[in-house]
Image (tube, rainbow, N blue to C red):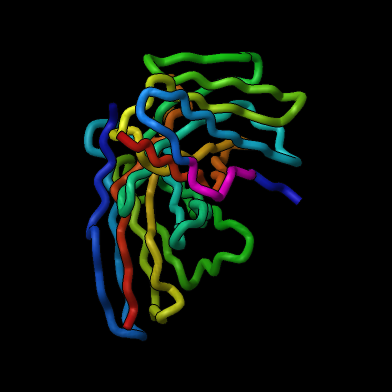
Amino acid sequence: SQKIEQNSEALNIQEGKTATLTCNYTNYSPAYLQWYRQDPGRGPVFLLLIRENEKEKRKERLKVTFDTTLKQSLFHITASQPADSATYLCALYNFNKFYFGSGTKLNVKP
Amino acid sequence: GAVVSQHPSRVICKSGTSVKIECRSLDFQATTMFWYRQFPKQSLMLMATSNEGSKATYEQGVEKDKFLINHASLTLSTLTVTSAHPEDSSFYICSAETGTGNTGELFFGEGSRLTVL
C-alpha cells in the first residue's frame, strides 16, 4: 500500500539549533516533493519544492534533500527560532495529485 | 504568492441540513482545485479534484452524492455537504494550482471548520 510517513512525535529543540524533519514514502513515484507549514486551525503554507532530479534545495534558513533511492526527504531549519514552531507537512505530487504526510510538530524553545 | 479565500471559516449546523463551502482564487485563475479533509492531528485526506467546467473526480471511499463539488468558473469551486451528520464534522480545506507555467505549488485556503450537532 502507499504510505507517506512523518514522525508523529513532536520534535523539541532549543532556539538556534538545526531542526531536521524526515519524510519517508513507499509505493509512490513522485515527480516532485514539497514541504508545507501548517499552524493550528489554518491552511498549509508552501515552503519548498524539490524535483526528482534534484538532490538539494535551499531557501534562506531552509534546506530540503530528496533521495529517490531511499525514498526519503529531509527538511532542515537552521538557526531555528520560536516562530518556526508549527507542524510541517511533506507532500508528494504523483499522477496529477498531491498526497500529504500527517506532519511533524516542531517546538522551538527559547 | 497567490491568494485562495475560503468561506465560511467556521460553521455549525444541525444534523440533516446541508452546508456549502466556497473556495475562491482571488488573483489567479485556478484550472484545478482540490478539496481536502483533515481530522485532528492527522494528515490532509484528498477528497476530490475539480476541474473547471467538468465533473469532479472523487477519491475512493468519498461519496460523491454526499459531498457535491461544483467548479463553475476559473475562480470558484464549492463543496456542499448534504444531509450532514455529526461524523461529517471536520476541517475542510481547499487548494488550487495555477494552469500554464505553474511551479507545482499548491495555494491553500484558510480552511472551514464544520461542526454538525
Residue drawn at point x = 34 percent, y = 46 percent = A43
- Give residue A29's quadrant in the image: top right
Instruction: Tell me if residue B20 comes above or below residue A34 in the rendering.
Output: below
Instruction: Tell me if residue B45 comes above or below residue A104 in the rendering.
Output: below
Query: x and y percent of residue A75 in the render?
Result: 52, 27
Q: How many numbered callouts?
A: 0
Front-most of residues A19 and B75: A19
Front-most of residues A88 and A99: A88
Q: Quadrant of the N terminus of chain B?
A: top left
Query: x and y percent of residue B23 in the render?
Result: 30, 50
Question: Is residue A7 at least partly visible in the picture?
Answer: yes
- Give residue A73's quadrant in the image: top right
Query: x and y percent of residue A9 in the render?
Result: 54, 49
- Give residue A56's quadrant in the image: top right
Position of residue A54 in the picture relative to residue B76 (left or right): right
Question: Is residue A93 at least partly visible in the picture?
Answer: no
Position of residue B14 in the picture relative to residue B43 (left or right): left
Q: Is residue A6 magenta?
A: yes
Position of residue A27 in the picture relative to residue A105 (left or right): right
Instruction: Tell me if residue B86 comes above or below residue B64 in the rendering.
Output: below
Front-most of residues B45 and B26: B45
Residue drawn at point x = 67 percent, y = 30 percent = A72
Query: x and y percent of residue B117 in the render?
Result: 32, 83
Residue drawn at point x = 31 percent, y = 46 percent = B109
Q: Is residue B76 magenta?
A: no
The magenta stretch is A5-11
Position of residue B14 in the picture relative to residue B106 (left or right): left
Residue drawn at point x = 51 percent, y = 45 percent = A103
